[in-house]
Amino acid sequence: MKKITLATLIGLVLTGCGGGGGDDSTAPQPPIETKPLAVQGTINAVNVPANTIEVNGYSYDVASVAYGADTQYSIKDLQKNMMVAISTSSKAGALVQLEPTMVGMVTHIDRANSTFVINGATLTFSLDQNIDVNDWVMVSSLPQATETGLGYKVLSVVKFEHEGLVGQYEVEGRLSLLNENNKTFTLGAAIQVRYTDNIIEDNAILQNGQWVEVKGQMIGDTFDASEVDVETYDASDNDNEIEGVVTWVSNDKSQFELNARGRFMVTGSTYFEDGTKANLNIGVMVEVTAVNGIAREIEFENDFDGDFGDAWHEFEKKGILANITATSFTVNGFKIEIDSQTIVDNNEKLVDLDGSRVEVEGVIIGSRYVAREIEREDD
């Protein structure tokens, strides 16, 4: 699938960027209000007669609507709360790319409990009455913490009958429980995926903690992958805007993770709208405008205690680091996992910290404690 270009943190920038907005004597000024060149977010409104949609507070004239490289749709197919990526590079208008979290067939519906099953995942959402078992749907969602792992907060479920969509399966999510010997991994909280090395796009190396997009077929209870694509927010020197949920934030609020997919820096010039730096907490919904991994503007979208906040938990551990493996270590005997989003300060390697006193910040995903930042403890 075509992916929007969005900013991510470059590892070497992690040190020396300071504590973030609000610490300077001169308050940051709001950026000049212009439409970003690239946007990812949910549709707020669709105006078919005017041929426009609203995303992240901006109205766009729609030039085309697509899913993947070949499947074309029209503005009539768009609905509120669908996740899309928009590029304004065309003079004809906005190029709209559908960015669902899942595409597949509904295999079970429990209307009494507002749940349904797609691609092996049980999701919570009140489906429209016109959606039945065996219908093909697109699901848009954002990450949500659950008792069993990182799950999905469903935003919309849209039924499609287009020939180009029926028969396609897709699922995105956080990769965990990677087993390179058996060629399996888990997406989200419980989706079991089977893969082979030759189907991984761009020869990427799979790691726990990555956000991946998988296409293939459901075979029994297993998603049999035909394509695996590691998704990140690519660095760009132009303004890019992305909507999502904060899935980790450092104690000093100098950096944060968005949608379990990429990390952004907060500097003294970062401008906060409808909130302050103090409101930048795990579980909060934001719109981030960024250039090269640096957040220029952070706009808060809720009252700081919305649907995403209660289930997210962070932790901090201090002590002696030991028992290093490829996937974990211990601090004073307490097991902590590492993944692709774990960063060691000062560009050190984890093995360099063996036996040292450290401070670890991280997130609790289901029953697992996963490190986000590791640094030597000050003497």
Image: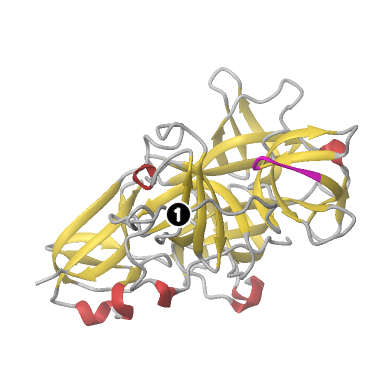
Whole-percent x, y for residue 354 in the image: 18, 78
- Mark 1, residue position: 28
Q: Nearer the viewer, residue 378 or 132?
A: 378
Q: Tell me the kind of residue under disc 1.
A: Pro
Residue 323 location (% of width, % of height): 19, 72
Given residues 239 and 147, the one toward you in this image is 239
Residue 58 magenta-highlighted: yes
Q: Residue furthest left?
A: 379
Left or right of residue 193: residue 217: right
At 41% from the left and 77% from the top, the residue drawn is 12
The magenta span reads: 56-60
Residue 308 as seen in the image, left or right of residue 335: right
Residue 348 in the image: state x and y as whole percent: 29, 80
Q: Quadrant location of the C terminus? A: bottom left
Q: Secondary structure at mark 1?
A: loop
Question: Going 38% across and 71% down the picture, which residue do you hit?
Answer: 14
| Colouring mode (rainbow / by chain / secondary structure / one colour) | secondary structure
Residue 2 is situated, as x and y percent measured from the top left of the image, at 73, 62
* Quadrant of the rendering where the N terminus is positioned: bottom right
374 drawn magenta: no
Q: Is residue 136 visible?
A: yes
Q: Which residue of the protein is positioned furthest toward the top in this rendering?
A: 112
Q: Main secondary structure of the magenta part?
A: strand
Q: Give the residue at x 59% y 52%.
A: 242
Answer above or below: position of 11 versus 134: below
Residue 217's image quarter? bottom right
